[in-house]
């Protein structure tokens, strides 16, 4: 629901398009959406990187929404949630919910959107799952859109150089979003130190 109705003509994307720190990336995403049919036919994706709260997920959801509206098939997952879903297939009670059918769905949709790549704890199992998924989409020329807080070198350390190499082939160079965290934060006056929070008022309020 948070991303329903996301558009280039509405905040926060319209604000990002005017911000020198983000407008180049917004323009690149707009060009991708304008050529969506061609990009998906070529198996070309997008890689959005940057610090927390800079708009990566919003722009990625804009692309995914455009693909859905155009009638393409897609799957949208945060990486921790995707890995948890893969783990559940090992305990599936029916064949349709087992690993292979789920993997085939992930690799056959027109667009796979993975949010927070690199947010998971590194393990041999995680490396294996990511490599198998990205490699299959790379071989079959299926588009991937990813968001991550990590730069390319950090991502190689987290998910492996082979997987990152294939992502570069699919997505091209990362589009880097700069700037401060744009998510809502409480007013500064509410962030009181514990001592202030416990302090007694100067005078007790009068009774009604």
Image (spheres, helix red, strand yellow):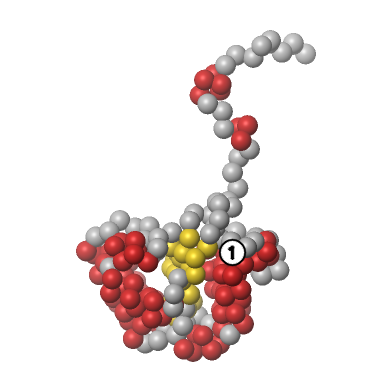
Task: Assess disc 1: are there few (<14), some (14-19) or many (≥20) residues with their C-alpha within 10 Å of its C-alpha.
Answer: many
Total numbered circles: 1
Question: Residue at point 46% right, 64% down?
Answer: 49
Quadrant in the picture for the C terminus:
top right
Tell me: 100 left or right of 117.
left
Across and down, in percent, residue 115 comes to 45, 64
Choose between 46 and 66: the one closer to the eye.
46
Choose between 77 and 124: the one closer to the eye.
124
Residue 127 in view in this figure: yes
Across and down, in percent, residue 174 comes to 45, 71
Question: Residue at point 24% right, 64% down?
Answer: 125
Q: Quadrant of residue 185?
A: top right
Q: Quadrant of residue 190?
A: top right
Residue most toward the right?
Answer: 208
Across and down, in percent, residue 62 comes to 59, 70
Q: Return the residue at label 1.
A: 22
Quadrant in the picture for the N terminus:
bottom right
Residue most toward the left?
Answer: 124
Across and down, in percent, residue 159 comes to 30, 65
């Amino acid at each position: 629901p948070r991303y329903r109705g996301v558009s280039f003509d509405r905040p926060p994307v319209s604000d990002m398009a005017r911000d020198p720190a983000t407008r180049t990336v917004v323009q690149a995403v707009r060009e991708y959406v304008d050529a969506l049919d061609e990009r998906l036919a070529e198996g070309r994706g997008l890689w959005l990187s940057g610090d927390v709260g800079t708009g990566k997920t919003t722009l990625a959801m804009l692309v995914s929404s455009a693909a859905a509206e155009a009638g393409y098939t897609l799957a949208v997952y945060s990486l921790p949630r995707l890995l948890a879903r893969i783990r559940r297939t090992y305990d599936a009670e029916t064949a349709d919910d087992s690993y292979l059918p789920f993997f085939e769905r992930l690799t056959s949709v027109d667009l796979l959107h993975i949010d927070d790549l690199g947010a998971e704890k590194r393990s041999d199992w995680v490396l294996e799952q990511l490599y198998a998924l990205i490699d299959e989409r790379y071989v079959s020329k299926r588009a991937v859109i990813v968001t991550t807080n990590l730069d390319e070198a950090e991502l190689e350390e987290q998910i492996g150089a082979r997987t990152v190499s294939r992502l570069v082939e699919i997505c091209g160079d990362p589009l880097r979003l700069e700037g401060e965290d744009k998510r809502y934060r409480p007013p500064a006056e509410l962030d009181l130190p514990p001592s202030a929070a416990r302090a007694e008022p100067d005078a007790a309020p009068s009774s009604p």
